Amino acid sequence: MIRVVLPFHLRTLAKVEGEVHLDVAGTATQRSLLEALEARFPVLRGAIREHGSLQRRPLLRFFACAEDVSFDDPDAPLPDAVARGEEPFFIVGAVSGGQE
Amino acid sequence: MSGVRVLVGTRKGAFILTADGQRKQWRIDGPFFGGWEIYHLKGSPADPNRLYASQSSGWFGQMIQRSDDGGQTWNPVDNQFTYEGTPGAHLWYDGTPHPWEFKRIWHLEPSLTDADTVYAGAEDAALFRSSDGGKSWQELPALRSVQGEKWAPGAGGMGLHTILLDSAKPQRLFIAISSAGAFRTDDGGQSWKPINKGLHSEYIPDPTAEVGHCVHRIAMHPSRPNTLFMQKHWDVMRSDDAGDSWREVSGNLPTDFGFPIEVHAHEPETIYVVPIKSDAEHYPPDGKLRVYRSRTGGNDWEALTAGLPQAHCYVNVLRDAMAVDQLDECGVYFGTTGGQVYASADGGDHWEAIAEHLPAVVAVEVQTLP
């Protein structure tokens, strides 16, 4: 079981509170985690990764075990502590200001 | 008694204002989708309980929400807007080619007859249609083949912001893009023609170019679909031949820069604009918020000020932020970037703020309820 922490607006979209717990088949990677997340919450398709290219949206970041893993290979295994559910995988909206 | 439902899109959520036919007591519901930009929301003429909303965010992209109960509850529908084929390139601000990239939906226009059919105007400019209530979207790609390589974004982006449907000619649509101009199809979107003859724009390399004009908004009265009124970047224009030619009707306006333009529900020659000081100063001249009304289809304009702030007012009224209702005495509504929604229940003679302190208002639409 993998624990995922979503930012407020994605929790609202997905209509969940608190952490999301996912079962990911095989080796847990960013890609398999996000595919499992989007399969469970189809509303999140396009909100984390772009449609088509599946690239991470520019103003989102991924954190695991206190490390920014946003630029890691999406097919690289996630840290063991995340894969075992000891540490959550964070999807974070960048602190990038905005118009207002 | 009949009533009205005012759909308000803001920078930080949507609000729904309702009143009975007297339009004196208003109930405000919302925010819906708090924290998200709601560029537009609109109800289906075929089913007033069917609403569509464009919800977007720089962080999380585009969502389309749909309500089947008049806005009490909402559910997301498909948010995948894919350009047909190889998207190609349009002009960038520096005159270089720039690939088409989807950013957001600026405008949703439900079909006049089928609640499940809805058009969506996108930035970067393209027209999409859903015929299954928003569960899937398909582009009408022929539009971008009309000299799309010459289109360029305005300061606010290259958005398709106006979609007008002609009830007498279901295959005819008018659309407008900032800043490519106006276009018309007479075959349901299989082919398009630019309809910008007569427009004169000093700020583009060829002031009378076939495409490239910064059209801010077009309005049409449903009983006279060949007559169109346009608020351009500068100039208020009129066409009486379905856009084939335009003539200026700015007349005695204090400034002919502005964003919205609307037509009275029952008087096809009565139109409304909100003059803005200039392209460099997006607020009313002299700090006075004035709606201007022409009862002659342009040229002769009168200022409508009763109930509107006449000092120290520096808000803007954006292109999609004005609408009319269909009650016997036509109501006129507009929202400001200062978060006010003003309403007039007498065709513009008197105004009152029916909501204040909202986030900046981007869009106002009105449904007249049975």
Image (tube, grey):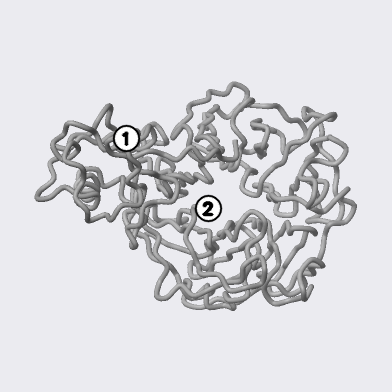
Kind of residue at badge 2: His
Task: Return the chain for callout 2.
Answer: B
* Distance between mark 1 and mark 2 Cα atoms: 41 Å
Q: SS at mark 2?
A: strand
Can you name the residue that lies furthest to the left here? Answer: A26
Above or below residue B275? Residue B238 is: below
Residue assigned mark 2 = B107
| Residue under the image location 58 percent in, 76 percent down | B149
Q: Position of residue B40 (x, y in %)?
A: 52, 46
Q: Left or right: B133 with respect to B276? A: left
Residue B114 can be seen in this image: yes
Which residue occupies the foreground of this view, B40 or B86? B86
Q: Left or right: A67 with respect to B213? A: left
Image quadrant in which you'd find residue A73: bottom left
| Residue under the image location 67 percent in, 37 percent down | B337
Can you name the residue that lies furthest to the top here? Answer: B25
Residue B326 can be seen in this image: no
Q: Position of residue A17 (x, y in %)?
A: 28, 27
Query: Which labelled disc corresponds to residue B92?
Result: none
Residue assigned mark 1 = A66
| Residue under the image location 44 percent in, 42 percent down | B48
Label 2: how many residues lie within 10 Å, few (<14), some (14-19) or many (20+)? many
Above or below residue B16? Residue B51 is: below
Q: Position of residue A1 (x, y in %)?
A: 13, 37
Q: Nearer the viewer, mark 1 or mark 2?
A: 1
Task: Return the chain for callout 1.
Answer: A
Above or below residue B43? Residue B205 is: below
Kind of residue at badge 1: Ala
Label 1: how many residues lie within 10 Å, few (<14), some (14-19) or many (20+)? few
Q: SS at mark 1?
A: loop
Which residue occupies the foreground of this view, B51 or B203? B203
